Image (tube, rainbow, N blue to C red):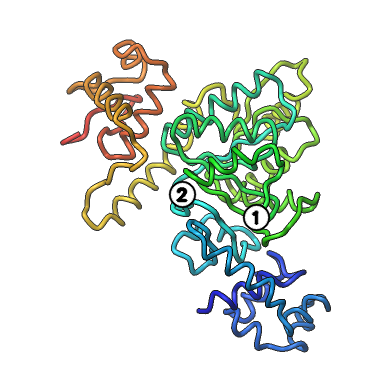
Amino acid sequence: MSERDWLRLACTPGVGATLGARLIERYGTPARILAAGDAAWRELGIPRAARDTLATPDNARVDEAERWLDRDDHHFITPEHPHYPAALGELVPPPSWLYALGDTELLTYPAIAIVGSRNPTTAGLEAAREFGAALAGAGLVVVSGLARGIDAAAHEGALSANGMTIAVCGTGLDRVYPAMHKDLAERIAASGLLLSEFGLGTQPARGNFPRRNRIIAGLCTATLVVEAARASGSLITARMASQAGRDVFALPGSIHNPLARGCHQLIRDGAKLVETTDHILEDIAGVLDGYRLIRSDSDDSGKNERDPRSSPAEDDDHATLLAAIGHAPARVDELVARTGWSADAVSSTLLILELQGRVLAGPGGAYTRASGG
């Protein structure tokens, strides 16, 4: 199917996620949509300006998009793309296309969103970095929105752990918002992924960010909220995640901290209170087990390949923990005592080893080495 036809549709002003999904559902392919004609488009409720552009495409804008896509690591992702996230296909309506800059394979890994205030406390920033680093170190993709405050700290934490992170943007990917995060965006693009539903040239606008938050919530297995006021975009993201059937976690805080009130409200509404990454990893273990089985089944060699991001130091850590487990079942607290590591570090490394098929989780929270592990 012609990528240019998809780009003609994506570059049509007024055809966003909702109308795009309706058109695809009705006609099946962009080529059929473009051939349908004005009367059919009008019947579907397509605005006049969009109908005019569909009839007479803005070829200069489409050409610009094609030039952008000619560059390394620049991608246009439609439902036909092998890395189009199945999780986003569950949204109503699903995004019909996404622009991406970086490694699109990250869209196939289990992901967790970390969101929160743009003006957090120092403690909130530290918590976002720590959770970002620990969860990325556990093999999860850390997803956030590149905003000031908690978002940026979560991305930084993931990068500091040599982990995987995705920034979902509320602008076109040919610009960075806020501009102060240009360096951060470049580092994410180099080792992670920038993602946007918006076409090139799209400026930041208030209405863009709920759409961005919807992508964040839909993309992830779970969402963690770190510091949020009662009326904030982070709470909207959390509610979108809950409505999409995803887990929502929240960090509690002081009753005197206004930025803890949103998290406390979420907890009262049913979000899960967390204090350590263990609480999250234990809760989503079933999802991760299912992911591991899917990856194992899809491996043609029948063997789990080691993550190319792993470093010699990480391999040493894995060997240390495997040696500490020995040949009898061992619980996390026993491994903490044997290694001198923190509980978070032990749990994160155990999860990586479990995803690699090198350790097995047993009853009572005990772990054993897998045969050959």
**x, y (%) of residue 75?**
52, 61
Residue 119 lies left or right of residue 310; in this view the side is right
Residue 105 lies left or right of residue 45; in this view the side is left
Residue type at mark 1 is: Asp
| Front in this rendered view, residue 310 or 294 | 310
Callout 1 secondary element: loop
> What is the total number of numbered labels drawn onto the structure image?
2
Cβ atoms under marks 2 and 1 closer than 8 Å: no
Callout 2 secondary element: helix
The residue where tag 1 is placed is 174
Q: Which mark is residue 106?
A: 2
* Residue at 75% in and 25% down: 259
Q: Earlier in the sequence, mark 2 or mark 1?
A: 2
* Residue at 62% in and 81% down: 27
Quarter of image, res 65: bottom right
Quadrant placement of the C terminus: top left
Q: Is residue 158 above or below residue 78?
A: above
Q: Is residue 288 above or below residue 275?
A: below
Quarter of image, res 268: top right
Residue type at mark 2 is: Leu
The alpha-carbon separation of the residues under discs 2 and 1 comes to 20 Å
**x, y (%) of residue 193?**
52, 48
Q: Neighbour class for label 1 at 10 Å: few (<14), some, many (≥20)? A: few
Residue 81 lies left or right of residue 129; in this view the side is left
Quarter of image, res 306: top left
Q: Nearer the viewer, mark 2 or mark 1?
A: 1
**x, y (%) of residue 154?**
58, 32
**x, y (%) of residue 285?**
42, 37
Residue sitting farthest toward the right:
48
Q: Is residue 299 above or below residue 81?
A: above
* Residue at 67% in and 76% down: 23
